[in-house]
Image (cartoon, rainbow, N blue to C red):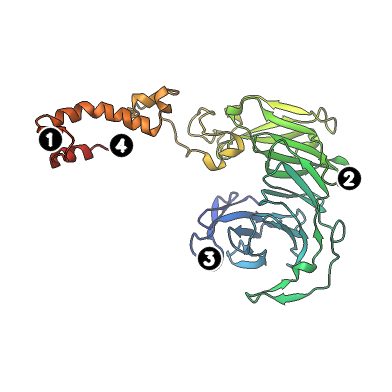
């Protein structure tokens, strides 16, 4: 199904059906939450797309919404610190919820089945392997960790018999301390800089490809074979197979990678910014199923690679300067300017002072104190003219008349 869900900072989830060109839900919210009190941290569809999982900042539950009527089907108690990332396994059997620690849930029973040590900081990305036996996670450091979904391997405890207890809220919950815990990851992958999002794709022969899009606007890919036994020292990182980067940082880095065509030796890179993406097919293998290209440098961007409407027109009011963003690549998510259509035909006079109209002007570098002093010097003549006619006592610095005080305070700095 062609569904799109967007979580808002004011605590609402909006869902569209692109196939029907219809708005399904305008405001799915956490039950009992005050309006706008809890921003949406993450959303994730079920495999059938009949339900939607959502977590909210500061909320100790993850909610499953029925997309037919918007009602809450289930809620998963993740703890007082809540969750900020969600991921459903491709076969629909597991739900992974992550804050700094990670928890695995059975979507068949709704029970928590395994715990993971996770990271020292909040998790940024989660992705299951296509065979649903492992998943990967990343945080603010440079490392991507591989975890096992098996309930007995690499754990500190074996599954216990079902034991329920009542929480303070009256909900029955699993005795978490008796659940299997995996303290160390099965494998570790080191990227060039902290990763922002991760993905896993299938390769012929049962192996996988792991990708990470990073803060430095690059993307790193690794060959991942989960059938291999982990090294004795799990902290030893797996070497990268391929690094993709942009030659021109001003053009924007790599926002995301899609691995659907990896068997043809290609990946689909999303470049420039999340709000104004440009899509580019990138060759990463020398031949189908062949040797990796260790480094791939991407050239400048082309407007022809933007999304197009049904009529074939580029979805963009008019061609724009691709370097006209405050920041590049993945970092624009928080700093990107609002999209404004540039009207070069209309001659709208600018009110920008000459002192700052020229980029790099020295006056731009003045401190606030220096600017006030310069303004004071400019106003000196006006103040001297206003002071004419005052008696000698006023000129010597004694109290000024009210009229002069009024003129002085009318100047806005």
3 or 4: tag closer to the N-terminus: 3
Quarter of the picture containing the C terminus is: top left
With respect to residue 297, does 124 lie above or below? below
Circle number at residue 33:
3
Question: x and y percent of residue 59 in the render?
Answer: 59, 63
Res 209 quadrant in image: top right
**Residue plotted at (66% across, 67% down):** 74
4 or 1: tag closer to the N-terminus: 1
Q: Nearer the viewer, mark 4 or mark 2?
A: 4
Res 273 quadrant in image: top right
**Residue plotted at (74% across, 43% down):** 143
The kind of secondary structure element at disc 3 is loop
Circle number at residue 413:
4
Spatial separation of the CA atoms under disc 2 and disc 1: 89 Å
Residue, disc 1: 393
4 or 2: tag closer to the N-terminus: 2
3 or 1: tag closer to the N-terminus: 3
């Amino acid at each position: 199904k062609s569904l799109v869900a967007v979580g808002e900072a004011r605590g609402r989830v909006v869902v569209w059906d692109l196939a029907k060109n219809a708005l399904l839900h305008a405001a799915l919210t956490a039950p009992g939450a005050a309006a706008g009190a809890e921003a949406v941290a993450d959303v994730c569809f079920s495999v059938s797309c009949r339900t939607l999982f959502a977590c909210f900042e500061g909320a100790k539950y993850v909610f499953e919404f029925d997309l037919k009527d918007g009602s809450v089907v289930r809620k998963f108690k993740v703890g007082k610190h809540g969750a900020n990332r969600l991921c459903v396994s491709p076969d629909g059997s597991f739900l992974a919820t992550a804050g700094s620690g990670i928890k695995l849930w059975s979507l068949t029973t709704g029970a928590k089945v395994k715990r993971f040590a996770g990271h020292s900081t909040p998790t940024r990305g989660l992705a299951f392997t296509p065979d649903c036996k492992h998943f990967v996670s990343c945080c603010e450091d440079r490392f991507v960790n591989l975890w096992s979904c098996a309930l007995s391997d690499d754990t500190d405890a074996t599954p216990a018999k079902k034991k329920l207890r009542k929480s303070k809220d009256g909900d029955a919950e699993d005795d978490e301390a008796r659940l299997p815990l995996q303290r160390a990851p099965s494998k570790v992958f080191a990227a060039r800089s902290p990763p922002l999002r991760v993905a896993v794709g299938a390769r012929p022969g049962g192996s996988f490809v792991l990708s990470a899009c990073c803060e430095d606007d690059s993307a790193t890919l690794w060959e991942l074979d989960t059938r291999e036994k982990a090294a004795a020292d799990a902290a030893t990182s797996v070497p990268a197979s391929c690094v993709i980067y942009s030659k021109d940082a001003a053009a924007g880095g790599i926002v995301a990678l899609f691995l659907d065509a990896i068997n043809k030796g290609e990946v689909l890179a999303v470049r420039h910014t999340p709000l104004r993406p440009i899509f580019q097919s990138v060759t990463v293998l020398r031949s189908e199923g062949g040797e990796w290209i260790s480094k791939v440098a991407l050239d400048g961007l082309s407007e022809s690679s933007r999304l197009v409407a049904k009529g074939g027109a580029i979805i963009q009011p008019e061609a724009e300067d691709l370097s006209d963003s405050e920041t590049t690549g993945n970092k624009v998510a928080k700093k990107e300017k609002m999209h404004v259509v540039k009207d070069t035909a209309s001659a709208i006079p600018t009110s920008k002072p000459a002192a700052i109209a020229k980029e790099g002007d020295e006056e731009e570098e003045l401190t606030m104190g220096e600017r006030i002093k310069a303004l004071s010097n400019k106003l000196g003549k006006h103040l001297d003219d206003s002071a004419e006619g005052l008696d000698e006592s006023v000129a010597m610095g004694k109290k000024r008349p009210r009229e002069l005080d009024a003129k002085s305070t009318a100047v806005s700095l």
